[in-house]
Image (cartoon, rainbow, N blue to C red):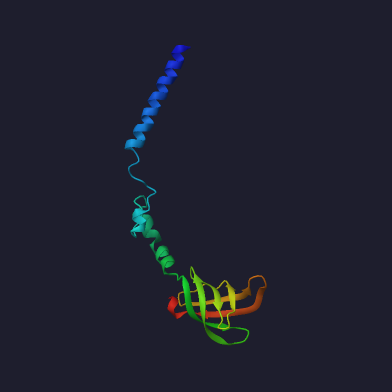
């Protein structure tokens, strides 16, 4: 019995030494580090072939505007057009603001490569307003 306890204890010491050594000398390269990404590069574990295959997708994503822009917004119901401020996120016109302090949210108003979008208007808590708005954003291209 004493022999088996000594053997188990010996193996535990060996395993402990291996763990300490692996922490001390292994893992000097942190593959989860964002340092390269923060500098505008790609992590070293992403292959050049993968980057080449998806470079167009990445560039398209980078070009989608975020923020507030002045757009031309035209109501299909009334036929009237207005220069209004709009919130745009990930290339989607989410909300247009009127000069009287009101606003409308838009559903499905994704900007195309020409800065045009179309979306159904709704007011949160009240629902859809049965009006479609055509949006043109010349500064969003």
Give the quadrant of the C terminus: bottom left
Q: Position of residue 99 (x, y in %)?
A: 55, 83
Q: Residue at x 33, y 36 (%)?
A: 24
Q: Is residue 128 left or right of residue 13?
A: right
| Image point (46%, 16%), residue name | 5
Q: Is residue 75 left or right of residue 30?
A: right
Of all residues, the one furthest to the right in this rendering is 126
> What residue do we see at 65% from left, 77% from top?
129
User: How many numbered discs, if any?
Assistant: 0
Left or right of 21? Residue 64 is: right
Work out whether 65 lies above or below 79. above
Q: Is residue 42 above or below residue 89?
A: above
Does residue 29 sit above or below 8 in this rendering? below
Q: Is residue 29 above or below residue 50?
A: above
Q: Residue at x 51, y 79 (%)?
A: 85
On the image, the x and y values in percent for residue 19 come to 38, 32
Question: In x, y percent, where is residue 15?
Answer: 40, 27
- Name the foreground residue: 49 vs 137: 137
Q: Residue furthest front?
A: 101
């Amino acid at each position: 019995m004493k022999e088996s306890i000594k053997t188990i204890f010996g193996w535990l010491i060996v395993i402990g030494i291996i763990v300490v050594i692996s922490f001390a000398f292994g893992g000097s390269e942190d593959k989860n580090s964002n340092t390269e990404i923060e500098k505008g590069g790609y992590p070293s574990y992403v292959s050049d072939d993968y980057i080449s295959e998806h470079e167009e997708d990445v560039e398209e994503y980078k070009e989608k505007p975020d923020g507030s822009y002045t757009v031309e917004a035209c109501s299909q119901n009334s036929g009237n057009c207005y220069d209004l401020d709009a919130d745009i996120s990930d290339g989607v016109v989410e909300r247009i603001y009127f000069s009287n302090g009101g606003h409308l949210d838009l559903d499905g108003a994704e900007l195309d490569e020409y800065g045009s979008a179309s979306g159904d208007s709704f007011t949160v808590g009240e629902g859809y307003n049965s009006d479609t708005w055509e949006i043109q954003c010349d500064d969003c291209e």
